[in-house]
Image (cartoon, rainbow, N blue to C red):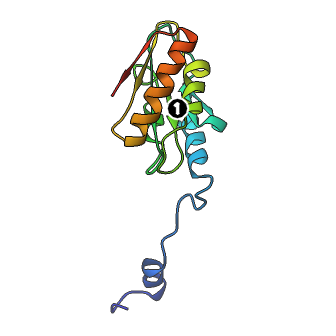
Amino acid sequence: MPPLMKRSLYKSLTSPAKHFLPNPTTLVHTSLLSIPLTNPSVLCDSPNKIIYRKHESPQVSIVSGGGSGHEPSFSSFVGKGLLSGAVAGTIFASPSAEQVRRCILHRVSREKGVLVVVMNYTVCFCELPLVTCWEWGVHGLEGAVLI
């Protein structure tokens, strides 16, 4: 222990780190549920891990998503003039095809079309474009995929 340092301070600086959200099984859901508390213009579909705009005017909807390795980052970009919806995967995994499908069909406006933005992550390259193109064919939707 360095001289002139109180024992309690030394102990707190050298003891194992405490986590802000200590339970990894609820980390993504807890993070997603906090977003509507800080941004009242969005809602959370917790079972599907989707953040989407509450009141959407007729416009092209923009949807993105990705894994939650660091945080459900895309969810913070949902709002007026930004994303219409964001789909969060689990920790270090992309969202499933079913999650993306639910977001496109049930959580964002499809009236003027949907643009799905795929970020630079290998699994997202595989999952998001496939489900998106399949949904558009089945439901006769207008949309595009941007990679």
Quadrant assignment for the C terminus: top left
Q: Which residue is mark 1?
A: 39
Outermost residue, right direction?
47
> Residue drawn at (57%, 11%), measured in percent from left and top?
139
Circle 1: is it few (<14), some (14-19), or many (20+) Cα within 10 Å?
few
> Taking 49 as reference, is 63 above or below it?
above
Quarter of the N terminus within the rendering: bottom left
Of 73 and 67, which appears nearest the observer?
Answer: 67
**Vertical arrangement, residue 26 with respect to residue 33, above or below:** below
Question: Label 1's element?
Answer: loop
The answer to which image quadrant residue 81 occupies is top left
**Picture coordinates of residue 66 (x, y %)?**
45, 39
Total of numbered circles in the picture? 1
Residue type at mark 1 is: Asn
Identify which residue is drawn at 47% across, 78% down: 12
Q: Is residue 136 above or below residue 79?
A: above
Q: Position of residue 8 (x, y in %)?
A: 49, 84
Query: How far across and how far down the image is residue 67, in percent?
Result: 47, 44
Between residues 63 and 22, which one lies in front from this camera angle?
63
